[in-house]
Amino acid sequence: MITSISKHVALGLTASALVITACSKPAEDTIPAAPDAAIQTVITEFAQGNGGILWEAMPASYQTDVTTLVKLAGTKVDAEVYDKSFATIGRLAEVVDQQQAFILNTSFLKGRSAEEMAELEAALPSVVGVINTLTQSELASSTGLLNFDGQAFFDTTVSKLAGYVEELGVLAGEEYVLSDYVNSVVSVVDADDLQATLLMTVPGEEPVEQTFTKVEERWVPADMASDWASSVAEATAELEATSPEDIAAQKPQIMGVLAMMDGVLTQIAAAETQEQFDQSLQGAMMPLMGLMMMGQGMGAPAAPMPAAPSSTPSVK
């Protein structure tokens, strides 16, 4: 259960580390000029919990594109619905943290093995940490979207998420966790001024060969470089097509579900016995399903991101 969650999160973050790696000399010369040393630095730094290296490694135009998309999303969401949705999710994390003992003894988890329950108990603080990190980030409010600062977001939010991914991986007993990528080795197979084929090796895994293209003095995966402009154009078109009228039509229903969820969370937080907790939890099922089914009702479609390279090392 927790293994699956942590694996998918780790895969996503590790893929991001390779998708937006770069080669240049920023103000503090953090990233070396050579392609192998640049990719090595980004992977190693991220594996050590430095999420800011990912933003720092992006080509300047890519940074501009991402910032523009996030700020455009901020103009398309319904501020009240968007902010209330994240506030409700944040409230859910608070209640989970407060009522952990009742959660671990609820009848809804009957049938789980002792090992699974022990794993859940150990993982709950990290799961709560992930939710809190997201609901307290710039992406959790319409104002935050409009004032998005990529470097600050990656320095703080992404770095914190990397730490929780590491904790969840260790608790799940995974063979490889994020910090194991500190020991990865990147070498050059072939390179010229505009393109480099690199061999990436993680101890215990088969080496992965991947081609990178130089974009504005940064090295990015070749397939990403070729698809970036079309992906950004597609994401922009989807956001621009968002209809204020459609959002307004959905708003009463969405706000109603959020109000129901608030009421249920208040009851769950107030539970003083296991019986009261289980009854309140049962009452949460319908509004929780409604919240999940709202989909894109918070105000705007999610901007599609370029696919991770197929050669990205996996976390087993």
Image: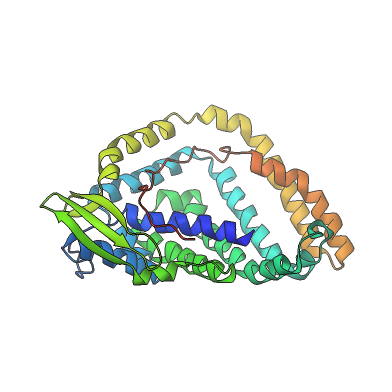
Point out residue 173 in the picture as x, y percentages from the top left corner. Answer: 57, 69
Point out residue 13 in the picture as x, y percentages from the top left corner. Answer: 43, 58
Asked whether, in this view, residue 109 is left or right of residue 25, the answer is: right
Residue 49 appears in the rendering = no
* Image-quadrant location for residue 50: bottom left
Compare residues 63 and 248 and report the one nearer the observer.
63
Residue 231 appears in the rendering = yes
Point out residue 110 in the picture as x, y percentages from the top left corner. Answer: 82, 60
Asked whether, in this view, residue 259 is left or right of residue 166, the answer is: right
Compare residues 101 and 18 and report the one nearer the observer.
18
Compare residues 256 and 8 and report the one nearer the observer.
8
Asked whether, in this view, residue 289 is left or right of residue 209, the answer is: right
User: In the rendered view of the protein, which quadrant contains the N terminus?
Assistant: bottom right
Compare residues 7 and 105 and report the one nearer the observer.
7
Asked whether, in this view, residue 7 is left or right of residue 191, the answer is: right
Image mark count: 0
User: Residue placed at 70% from the left, 63% from the top?
Assistant: 96
85 shown above or below 2: above
The single residue placed furthest to the right in the displayed view is: 275
User: Residue placed at 58% from the left, 37% from the top?
Assistant: 297
Point out residue 138 in the picture as x, y percentages from the top left corner. Answer: 46, 56
30 shown above or below 195: below
Check the image and tell me how it is coloured: rainbow
* Image-quadrant location for residue 256: top right
